[in-house]
Image (tube, grey):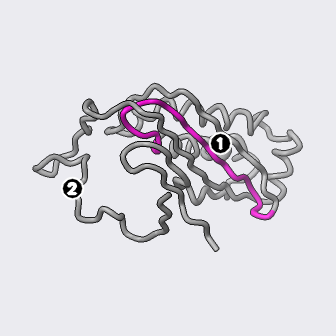
Amino acid sequence: MNNSSDSPPERLGQRLTHLDTQGQAQMVDVLAKDATVRQATASGLIYMQSATLEAIESGNAPKGDVIGTARLAGIMAAKQTSTLIPLCHPLPLKKISVTIEPDRDLPGYRIEATVKTKSETGVEMEALTAVSVAALTLYDMAKALEKSMRISDIQLVEKIGGKSGHWQKASVQ
């Protein structure tokens, strides 16, 4: 397992695969790669006032089921990643899970998405997109209660499979 923090990439100095020899953006050719199981997990936070969190938790948000709608939006967003991010490959996603858990210490919600496929390229962007859209949907569903909510810390926390193998974000001490 390769743990990393916010240090520079390990392969610093290698050519970015999304750039051609003239420095122009290109979609990476993955045809020669083997289709293997790939999995990625991303996480994020949405901060809000305690009163907003309590209204959502008690089912008193004006737009209805905030958490269920945000979870579904995250799943749908993961499936649409290649239409949103220009150089992402369309992938046959096999499993998408989005969890949204209240955290009264924030106060707010912790969002986590895990995406899995068997393909020639990874699903990091799909997991990150799922978390991002779930957080945006939480905001949209609760903005009538509070406009000062803050989305934060969207990040990849683990990836499994592919050429680089298993990577996990180092724990914050």
The secondary structure type at the circle numbered 2 is loop
The front one of 6 and 80 is: 6
Q: Hey, which residue is sitting farthest left in the picture?
A: 22
Residue 161, x across and y down, in percent: 45, 43
Residue 134, x across and y down, in percent: 62, 41
Q: Is residue 157 left or right of residue 2?
A: right
Q: Is residue 106 left or right of residue 139?
A: right
Q: Hey, which residue is sitting farthest front in the picture?
A: 1
Q: Hey, which residue is sitting farthest right in the picture?
A: 58
Can you see residue 83? no
Name which residue type carries label 2. Arg
Name which residue type carries label 1. Asp
Can you see residue 66? yes
Q: Is residue 13 left or right of residue 22?
A: right
* Magenta-colored stretch includes residue 110: yes
Residue 70, x across and y down, in percent: 67, 38
Residue 75, x across and y down, in percent: 59, 32
**What residue is rendered at 58% in x and 45% in y?**
131
The secondary structure type at the circle numbered 1 is helix
Residue ID for mark 1: 140
Q: Mark 2 or mark 1: which is in front?
A: 2
**What residue is rendered at 36% in x and 37% in y?**
88
Q: Which quadrant of the view contains residue 87?
A: top left
Q: Which residues are magenta?
A: 105-125
The front one of 127 and 36 is: 36
* Magenta-colored stretch includes residue 149: no
36 over 167 or under it: above or below: above
| Residue 107, label in figure | none
Q: Which quadrant of the view contains residue 172?
A: bottom right
Q: Are marks 2 and 1 in contact (CB under 8 Å)?
A: no
Residue ID for mark 2: 15
